[in-house]
Image (cartoon, helix red, strand yellow):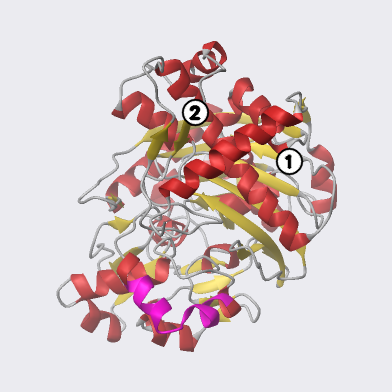
Amino acid sequence: MTSTVVAIDQGTTSSRAIVFTPDLTIAGVAQEEFPQIFPAPGHVEHDPEDIWRTTLDTLRAAVATAGIAAKDIAAIGITNQRETTLIWDRATGAPVHRAIVWQDRRTADTCAALKTRGAEPLVSARTGLLLDPYFSATKIARILDDVPGARTAADAGKLAFGTVDTYLLWRLTGGRVHATDATNASRTALFDIHTGAWDEELCRLFRVPMSLLPEVRDSSADFGTTHPDILGAAVAIRGIAGDQQAATVGQACFAPGMMKSTYGTGCFALLNTGETAVASKNRLLTTVAYQLGGKRTYALEGAIFIAGAAVQWLRDGLGLVAEAGETGRLAAESDPAQSVHFVPAFVGLGAPWWDAEARGALYGLTRGTTRREVARAALESVGQQTADLIEAMRRDWGGEGRTVLRVDGGMTASDWTMQFLADILDAPVDRPVIRETTALGAAYLAGLGAGVLPEPEVFARTWTLDRRFTPTMDAATRAAKRAGWSDAVRRTLSTT
């Protein structure tokens, strides 16, 4: 057995697989997009077979590109879009419904009704989460209620629930392993993050049979082996973490106070709080950052639903750009005198607002507004939303001065966007050499579990800076932009 590790990175719009060599350089990559399904306004679904097919295809392609065989792989790690909900038949493996994606808002009325009943304090105290359609619990109940016979079958123990990691693990192992890790479990609103166990009272509240739920293991653990048909021989699976937690690991944010932000379809900022599960007073989430050796490390998280998806909308929805990379150039050419703000609330607003009914809006348009200003507003919205999160984190966690933010994800390739981020935060932004930090985190957890990669403090020394973006914007301009953004958000909120 060699020290080669493979990461499966199953995301919202595509599936990827990356092969890492023993020194954690990339030897093979494959990626494949799959369709997004929008059956109704605010509804987002995936075909489970699309998730599985693209995962399997990219896994095989990456291994082939790297020129290795199953015998050369020490372990596989899985990282995944979180909260997305699947339920399948234990006997046949057939899904009973399409996957309901984390962005989906169809259970907003259910969440509102639970809030009216006064259930949110219980949910927050035990799970660190809020009552919002974002999380898995209400999605599970919705599938059981909408699919004829599903609730009866679930009560009889015939069905299985999983977030995407669990579903892929089930398929990869030929249906032999029904498990998840603590990070993914912590995103369901059914898991007590303090005891590290599924909560019976929460399951009753959300009407979810406990027989549906997978076993919860460490983020680096024995998750079984792949069926030999997958890669020609059985390969160990030794790591699982939700995508944002995997990025936290990949960014080596192991010390309390370290912070990372990932810019993909959405944007997710996590602040390591160590062994303390900090209860937010600013409507952030308290979550499990990772669990190793049975010991949980916690984080404060701010979730932004739309980041890179705003650029995709400019490209695919409006046709304003032919490819995403154009937006930085357009933003640089825009008229600074035009104060255009874009609030990308296509599926509601996440932290710290948590307004499921808000919808996207552009403000400040004039006859002089062009696609340049619209592109700039879309990119600036990412930085502005991040600033909202970090201001809330500082209030919860404490601490003054500039917090260095480690960034990763597709949008970090845009120097313009990263410079604006540093400017609006008035803080340094560090972009690493390896930007595939989500996959790197999954690979590291797998390698740690297989005994071929070192302990976290040693792994942290391998983190290497590509570029630090430092603030150059003057205070008056920053204040004006923040005020304009705050006014735009206020106008967008459904409660105003």
| Secondary structure type for disc 2 | helix
Specify the amino acid type for callout 2: Ala
Query: What span is in magenta?
Result: 110-124
In the image shown, does 471 or 149 lie closer to the viewer? 471
**Residue 301 sits in quarter:** bottom right
Residue 343 at what x, y percent from top left? 45, 40
Residue at the spot of label 2: 377
Crowd band around label 1 with a 10 angstrom C-alpha radius: few (<14), some (14–19), many (20+) = many
Confirm or deny contact between disc 2 and disc 1 (CB under 8 A).
Answer: no
**Residue at point 71%, 43% (across, down):** 251
Q: Is residue 428 above or below residue 357?
A: above
Residue 74 at what x, y percent from top left? 63, 48
**Residue at point 48%, 28% (across, down):** 340
Residue at the spot of label 1: 405
| Secondary structure type for disc 1 | strand
Q: Is residue 438 above or below residue 355?
A: above
Crowd band around label 2 with a 10 angstrom C-alpha radius: few (<14), some (14–19), many (20+) = many
Left or right of residue 144, residue 311 in this image: right
Residue 278 at what x, y percent from top left? 71, 69
Q: Which secondary structure type mostly characterizes the magenta part of the structure?
A: helix
Left or right of residue 495, residue 445 in this image: right
- Residue 363 appears in the figure: yes
Q: Quadrant of the C terminus?
A: bottom left
Q: Is residue 334 magenta?
A: no
The tag on residue 2 is none
Left or right of residue 356, residue 296 in this image: right
Specify the amino acid type for callout 1: Leu
